[in-house]
Image (cartoon, rainbow, N blue to C red):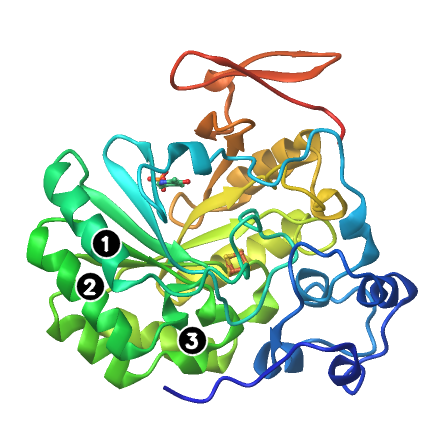
Amino acid sequence: MILHKTISTREEVEKYLRLSENEIRWFEQTEASLPFLVSTYYLSLIDPDDPHDPLRRQVIPSIEESEIQECELLDPLQEVSHSPLNRLIHRYDNRVALLVTDRCATYCRHCFRRRFTATEKSVISDKEVKEVTIYLANHKEVKEMLLTGGDPLLLSDEKLRNLITQIREKRADLTLRLCTRVLATYPMRITKELVETLVAIGSHPMFVMTQFNHPKEITTESVQSLSLFIERGFPIMNQSVLLKGVNDDVDTLEELMNLLVSHRVKPYYLFQGDLVEGSSHLRVPLEKGVEIERELRRRLSGLAMPQYALDLPHGGGKVPLNSTYLESRGEEGWVFKTLDGERRVYPSTC
Ligand SMILES: *Cc1c(COP(=O)(O)O)cnc(C)c1O
Ligand code: SF4
């Protein structure tokens, strides 16, 4: 595996760019739930002279993260209560998500899983893998499995090979999704050897799920890495997060989605920001999100158009943001009916 160069301290980051008042204040406090870590590759994409650089906002922390809103939770999707096993989330009958490691190549300030990410949970153990494979063997209703975290590509090729081989021994039929942000934050992680290994151990059918949030993240390096996957039969789907000051305008998203399609990546979801602690400065109001969605739908082809979706508060699950699920709009917020027929309220301002 190619050496992963990262920086994690104020001193190091100050060699690249001048921190703002709010950024300095984050480094001076000690109670952050999500540590600072960025790859030197991703940092090099940031314009040091632009305090509002859209990539900077995604990775350089600000003291605004300490402003926790009443509607925010550490585990807004209630993943813990939907976990039959350590690291295994079974929220929907036919698919599960496995938290392979808590590490990422770069930590995103908008991370909705900060109850887990970078919390010293480390890499899945052999014992845990064993338990998961037994669970899969006993739950044939599960048709898809998301390998996620953290970022599963922070595992060595060897560890990843062991994990997938053991899953395949029990369930050759399972469709796998490799959910990773390294194509945006550390594309050198994708090597010919890695891709060949994945093919050789029978990973297919496997989809690669990426998270590109801004056109500036699509570089020569990331395009090369995307091609390595595509040429060996891995379809690629992108899940963007709608982020204030990053991509909350139609022109930016239009350019991003068209660029993705031109590199053979299907825009899959555009996520409304989850109500996770310390992310209000990055969240876009629903009202604006819906407006953006409507205009995007007008400008983009069906192929380039992602599904605008949100995870309903208190583990209500994912729903596409369209009128079918919207019951009413009132003082307390927008009222939705979950797929289970329950009622959930998303506040109009938070
Ligand atoms: C989002 C999610 C999935 C996958 O949902 P799709 O709509 O099929 O992409 C699976 N499990 C969990 C826990 C999720 O949050
Ligand atoms: S890559 Fe994913 S898990 Fe890691 S910090 Fe970013 S959003 Fe969170």
Amino acid type, mark 2: Ile
Compared to residue 58, the image places residue 288 above or below, namely above
SS type, badge 2: helix
Question: Residue at position x 14%, y 61% from top?
Answer: 166
Question: CB of residue at label 1: within 8 Å of ligand 1?
Answer: no
Locate the N terminus and report the quarter of the image it occupies: bottom left
Amino acid type, mark 1: Leu
The residue pinned by badge 3 equals 223
Q: Residue furthest right?
A: 21
Relative to 118, 246 lies left or right: right
Residue 167 in picture, x, y percent from top left? 16, 57
The residue pinned by badge 2 equals 164
Q: Is residue 204 visible?
A: no
Question: Residue at position x 68%, y 48% from top?
Answer: 248
Q: Is residue 141 visible?
A: yes
Q: Nearer the viewer, mark 2 or mark 3?
A: 2
Q: Which mark is residue 176?
A: 1
Residue 162 in picture, x, y percent from top left? 20, 70
Amino acid type, mark 3: Val
SS type, badge 1: strand
- How crowded is the residue under tag 2: few (<14 C-alpha within 10 Å), some, or many (20+)? some
Locate the C terminus and report the quarter of the image it occupies: top right
Please report contact status of discs 2 and 3: CB closer than 8 Å, yes or no.
no
Q: CA distance from mark 3 to mark 1?
A: 22 Å
Relative to 335, 134 lies left or right: left
